[in-house]
Amino acid sequence: MKKEVKALIKNGPFCKVLDKIEEKKCHRAYLKRINTITKQGAYIVHEIEESLNDSGLTFFATCGTLLGLIREGRLLKNDYDMDYGILIEKPDDWKTLSVALSKIGYRKIREFSLNQRVTEETYKGKNGVEIDFFGHFIENGALCFYSYDKLPGVEYPSDDSWTAFRLVNGTYQGTKKIETDIGTVTVPLNAEEYLTYNYNDNWKTPNPDFKANTGKGCTMISGQFGKIKC
């Protein structure tokens, strides 16, 4: 009898109702995150920058956050999270990041690793905003970081396995401070070249159809999977 009830819940119309409720709940949370960044983005960036300035870490805006700041002088409209890069020079750098962020109320909610090396961490603030910190590594003279995705048709060895991508962004040239509509922000010294590797040569033109991990500096890693830990 218990099995029949479980099957009814799992496969019956009640399950569809639950899925619809969950979908609406996720959509409301998504819109709330966008609204928070729209209203508090300038303060969040200032808070993060001030915290990391005192940490001794090398950091800079990256991915969609960098794209908006360089192309439009502000955060992208409808952005639901924020992206920063951290230059990982020693194993303790991730711990240093965690300590710095905990002081301003951010807690780590997940991390990605590749070959047992942490490459990305995500932190969530009390306001609900999530910030992805991408570890950047200097490998064979090039600055690179790693990204992950679940792809259709791929047979993953476990639920926590993800397809891994390596993004090469040219040589590391340092960082600089720029003035934007949301205040002073740290970016790569060669920010425009960096964006070219991540978003291709036409990055200055908004492209709503752009898909992540398709920039000219991006290569899918074959035979290896990233691991997520929440």
Image (tube, grey):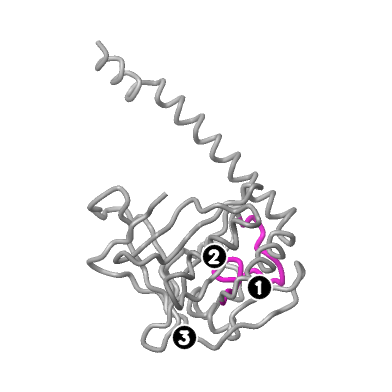
The kind of residue on which mark 2 rests is: Leu
Residue 70 is a magenta residue: yes
Asked if one can make out residue 216 in the rendered structure from this viewpoint, the answer is no
Q: Nearer the viewer, mark 1 or mark 3?
A: 1
- Location of mark 1 (residue): 53
Q: Secondary structure at mark 1?
A: helix
The kind of residue on which mark 1 rests is: Asn
* Disc 2 crowd, CA 10 A, few/some/many (<14, 14-19, 20+): some
Residue 66: mark: none
Q: Tag 3 or tag 1, which sits nearer the N-term?
A: 1
User: Where in the figure is residue 224, as x and y percent of width and height?
Assistant: 26, 65
The tally of labels here is 3
Using the image, determine if residue 12 lies above or below residue 121: above
User: Where in the figure is residue 16, as x and y percent of width and height?
Assistant: 42, 26
- Location of mark 2 (residue): 97
- Location of mark 3 (residue): 170
Q: Secondary structure at mark 2?
A: helix
How far, Cα to Cα, is label 1 from label 3? 25 Å
Using the image, determine if residue 145 lies above or below residue 230: below
Asked if one can make out residue 170 in the rendered structure from this viewpoint, the answer is yes
Question: What residue sits 43% from the left and 57% below the top?
Answer: 111
User: Where in the figure is residue 221, as x and y percent of width and height?
Assistant: 30, 70
Question: What residue sits 36% from the left and 68% below the top?
Answer: 165
How far, Cα to Cα, is label 2 from label 1? 11 Å
User: Where in the figure is residue 9, as x and y percent of width and height?
Assistant: 35, 20
How far, Cα to Cα, is label 2 from label 3? 24 Å
**In which quarter of the view is residue 77 placed?**
bottom right
> Magenta residues, as a range?
58-79
* Disc 1 crowd, CA 10 A, few/some/many (<14, 14-19, 20+): some
The kind of residue on which mark 3 rests is: Gly
